[in-house]
Image (cartoon, rainbow, N blue to C red):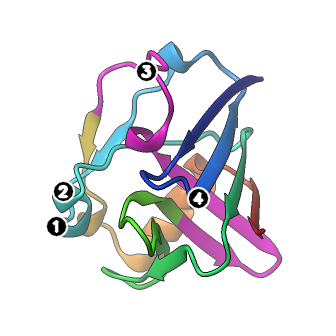
């Protein structure tokens, strides 16, 4: 596993992302929805990867937009967009905004994706195929 760490600007939210492949083998997805474009977000995930998010109490903000199926995760203190999460019965899936990761992990160039052209069911199916399945969220 390749371990990457990151945090929001004020460090109230920290994360550890584990990817089974080297970062260069991942092409971050730049969502073209208005919300993600305004945050210049590009996302990376792997269904065989894992994500751990640790947040100070009250720092973890959740915002639903678009189909309202997933939650955008952001810091309530500094406003940085951390990623996006989707919860189904007994499962949590997530993808990480590469802009919050430390250093230069060496990802391939981003590719623009357009989930707004998908139905809500198609979005959920795509998330389950692409996003990390091993997701832990902890307030400390």
Which circle's residue, 3 or 4, is located before the other in the chain? Answer: 4
Q: Which residue is mark 2?
A: 37
Q: CA distance from mark 1 to mark 3?
A: 24 Å
In the image, which residues are magenta? 85-110
Relative image position of residue 72 (x, y in whole percent): 44, 70
Relative image position of residue 13 (x, y in whole percent): 58, 59
Q: CA distance from mark 3 to mark 4?
A: 22 Å
At label 2, counting other C-alpha atoms closer than 10 Å, the crowd grade (few under 14, some 14-19, many 20 or more) is: few
Mark 3 or mark 4, whichever is nearer to me: 4
Q: Quadrant of residue 137?
A: bottom right
Q: Secondary structure at mark 3?
A: loop
Q: Quadrant of residue 140?
A: bottom right
In the rendered structure, the answer to whether residue 134 lies left or right of residue 126 reads right
Relative image position of residue 35 (x, y in whole percent): 23, 68
Q: Is residue 56 magenta?
A: no
Q: CA distance from mark 1 to mark 2?
A: 5 Å
Which circle's residue, 1 or 4, is located before the other in the chain? Answer: 4
Instruction: Write the residue at 70% across / 59% down.
Output: 54
Q: Is the Cβ of the residue at disc 4 closer than 8 Å to that at disc 2? A: no
Q: Which residue is mark 1?
A: 34
At label 1, counting other C-alpha atoms closer than 10 Å, the crowd grade (few under 14, some 14-19, many 20 or more) is: few
Which circle's residue, 4 or 2, is located before the other in the chain? Answer: 4
Q: Which residue is mark 3?
A: 107
Q: Secondary structure at mark 1?
A: helix
């Amino acid at each position: 596993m390749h371990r990457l760490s990151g945090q929001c600007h004020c460090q109230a939210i920290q994360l550890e992302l584990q990817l089974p492949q080297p970062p260069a083998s991942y092409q971050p997805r730049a969502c073209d929805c208005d919300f993600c474009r305004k945050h210049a977000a590009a996302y990376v995930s792997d269904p065989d990867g894992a994500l751990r998010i640790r947040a100070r109490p009250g720092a973890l903000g959740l915002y639903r937009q678009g189909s309202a199926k997933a939650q955008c995760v952001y810091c309530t203190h500094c406003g940085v967009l951390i990623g996006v999460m989707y919860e189904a019965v007994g499962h949590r899936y997530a993808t990480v905004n590469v802009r919050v990761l430390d250093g230069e992990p060496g990802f391939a160039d981003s590719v623009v994706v357009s989930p707004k052209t998908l139905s809500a069911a198609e979005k959920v199916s795509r998330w389950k195929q692409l996003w990390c399945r091993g997701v832990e969220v902890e307030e400390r």
